[in-house]
Image (spheres, rainbow, N blue to C red):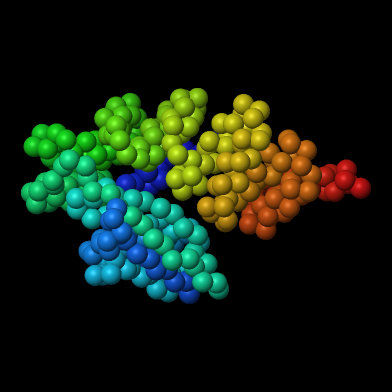
Amino acid sequence: MKRVIISVIVFSFIASFMFSAAYTGKGKLKGFVYDENGKPLEGVTVKLFSLRAASGFSVKTDSKGEWKAMWIRSGTWYIDFEKPGYEPKKISVNVKTYTKNPIIEIKLKKLAGVNVNEEALKKIEKGNRLFAQKKYKEAIALFESVLKDMPKLTLIYRNIGNCYFAMEKYDKAIENYKKAIQEKGDNTEIFVAIGNAYINKGENEKALEWYQKADVSKIKDYNVLYNIGVIFYNNFKYDKAAEFFKMAVDHNPEFADGWYQLGMTYVALNKVKEAIETLQKYLSLAPNSDKAPTVKSIIDALKKGGN
């Protein structure tokens, strides 16, 4: 099981990025952001973060709702879309450098029943900066002051939950995440956040309960998918475990541990061909790992058993 860190569940209001040339490469991305009616949204902040480089940058959409990210490195990128008055959205993509990457089209929903005034937006932005500076108590106080003036802006509880998560106060994080759940709307990110908090508490069954509330197709974080796979694996539900490990490596093809666990799950399922191919993929990514000698022995045994 992998311990979840706050970067895994950073949502819109609190995303922060380091700026470095480490993310440069030969890849190119572009996309469009629209409102619910398909109208282009100008001025959306698009924040891109390279997992491999541990750095990133941001751009804004133009009058056509278009944004571009040029000359970026390959691998997994987390992308946040933010615009005041709209629900934020977070995705992850696998950028390729020698083939054309698909155009990304995103729709943002307006915050239902809430008009966020300029003063509240400034407080939220300041709270975000405090979070980025690891001044979590100050950030919580600021977010709570926003809620005092605008109690219907319940998504702010998610920000507060993230602060407590970063402070490793997981019970308080869960308490606030639950307050952010909306009666109508997509709560996938919140359900995942609650599951992540339970993972870090060591309560895997409760974590799985919340992960399963989420729309799995919308879970883009490979660590979360991996953790769900581990829970199923430890409960001998190998078919389900393989499903989630496969999704994890699909989202991050360079995730060596994901390939290892998928390979071992195929071994448990007696899927020899798939096990060999998957474990060989693991060795190509981590040839000098501690597990490499054992993996080589398993592959040899599988090949001999198949003859």
Residue 235, position as x, y percentages in the image: 62, 26
| Vertical side of 276 occupied by 138: above or below | above
Quarter of the rendering containing residue 234: top right
Report how many numbered discs are placed on residues in the image: 0
Identify the residue shown where x is 9% and y is 51%.
Answer: 118
Residue 270 position in % (x across, y down): 78, 38
Q: Is residue 39 above or below residue 289?
A: below
Comparing 40 with 101, the one in front is: 40
For the point 67% across and 58% down, the residue is 284
Quadrant where the N terminus is found in the figure: top right
Residue 144 occupies which quadrant of the picture? top left
Which residue is at the front of the view, 182 or 122?
182
**Is residue 200 something that shows in the picture?**
no
Residue at the (71%, 41%) spot, across then down: 266
Relative to 19, is 92 on the left or the right?
right
Q: Residue at x 44, y 32 (%)?
A: 213
Residue 61 location, x and y as percent?
A: 28, 66
Q: In the image, residue 221 lies at what x, y percent?
A: 46, 47
Side of 76 where 266 appears, left or right: right
Residue with the most extreme right position: 307
Residue 37, visible in the rendered structure: yes
Question: Viewed as shown, does residue 222 lie left or right of 135?
Answer: right
Determine whether 174 is above or below 304 in the image. Answer: above
Q: Is 81 on the left-hand or right-hand side of 230?
A: left
Residue most toward the front? Answer: 37
